[in-house]
């Protein structure tokens, strides 16, 4: 059979469009790419500090380690998806990230995780505006609304949805939400790591926060009204 398989053609085209979106993301706003790299650095550094750490002496240490590791692994996937314009896919995983942070708060305050198992984490524990975005991301994850089709993007000057990812300002909006998730992790580690006995480089973390918070504020100013359209599903 000499005819090219459709999935092979799709994968090749997908990688091409992702490369174009990735380059546009980096070139249009280099500060956003710098932010993305700094977010990646914080979460991976947090994981490496835990690598090889024996959590058996920590209350609920096994569950805490699982939550922290899954947050880091998912973050790295989300970071790439945002850069490449795969925003619906990123949104679905970002919802998981919100629940993971909420569960970290719950686990840190409970004596036994048994009462938390088989229950959805309560996002009221989140400290940032992520709390108000949870409903939006749940709608996206469950395909419960047709308001977010635009996150698939469209072909240039075309009324049709695109089969492949394309760069838009929505990538930067999504990145600000990813940044909120990482700052949630930062505040959780700052408040709980020492008390729980988890390894944590507080000097590095405080320097990181001092650098990153102004960058997040600046990015929010850049996206401006686009943020309201994103949240409103327009």
Image (tube, helix red, strand yellow):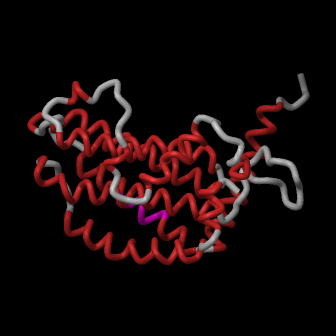
In-front residue for pair 148/33: 148
Q: Which residue: 23% across, 39% down?
A: 107
Quadrant including the N terminus = top right
Q: Which residue: 29% across, 50% down?
A: 48
Quadrant of residue 32 within the rendered picture? bottom right
Instruction: Give the answer, above or below, for where 27 lies relative to 115.
Output: below
Q: Which residue: 44% across, 55% down?
A: 130
**Does residue 64 show up magenta in the picture?**
no
Quadrant including the C terminus = bottom right
Q: Which residue: 38% across, 40% down?
A: 70
Q: Is residue 188 left or right of residue 232?
A: left
Residue 163 in the image: x percent, y percent?
A: 78, 44
Q: Residue furthest top?
A: 1
Q: Which residues are magenta?
A: 36-42
**Does residue 40 show up magenta in the picture?**
yes
Quadrant of residue 83 within the rendered picture? bottom right
Residue 223 in the image: x percent, y percent?
A: 60, 71
Instruction: Give the answer, above or below, for where 212 lies relative to 182.
Output: below
Magenta stretch mostly in which secondary structure? helix
Residue 86 in the image: x percent, y percent?
A: 64, 49
In-front residue for pair 224/168: 224
Q: Is residue 88 left or right of residue 54?
A: right
Picture mark count: 0
Residue 33 in the image: x percent, y percent?
A: 54, 68
Q: Is residue 184 left or right of residue 63?
A: right
Instruction: Give the answer, above or below, for where 207 lies relative to 77.
Output: below
Quadrant of residue 119 within the rendered picture? top left
In-front residue for pair 119/214: 119
């Amino acid at each position: 059979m000499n005819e090219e398989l459709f999935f092979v053609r799709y994968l090749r085209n997908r990688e091409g469009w992702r490369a174009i979106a990735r380059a546009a993301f980096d070139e249009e706003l280099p500060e956003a790419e710098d932010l993305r790299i700094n977010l990646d650095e914080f979460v991976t550094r947090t994981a490496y500090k835990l690598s090889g750490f024996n959590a058996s002496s920590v209350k609920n240490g096994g569950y805490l380690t699982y939550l922290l590791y899954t947050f880091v692994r998912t973050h790295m996937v989300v970071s790439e998806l945002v850069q490449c314009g795969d925003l619906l896919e990123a949104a679905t995983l970002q919802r998981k990230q919100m629940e993971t942070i909420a569960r970290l708060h719950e686990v840190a305050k409970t004596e036994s995780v048994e009462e938390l198992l088989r229950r959805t984490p309560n996002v009221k524990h989140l400290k940032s505006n992520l709390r108000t975005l949870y409903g939006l991301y749940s709608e996206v994850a469950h395909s419960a609304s047709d308001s977010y089709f635009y996150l698939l993007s469209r072909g240039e000057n075309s009324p049709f949805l695109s089969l492949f990812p394309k760069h838009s300002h929505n990538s930067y909006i999504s990145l600000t939400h990813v940044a909120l998730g990482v700052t949630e992790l930062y505040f959780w580690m700052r408040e709980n790591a020492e008390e729980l006995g988890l390894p944590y480089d507080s000097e590095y973390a405080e320097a990181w926060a001092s650098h990153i918070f102004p960058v997040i504020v600046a990015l929010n100013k850049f996206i401006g009204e686009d943020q309201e359209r994103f949240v409103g599903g327009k």
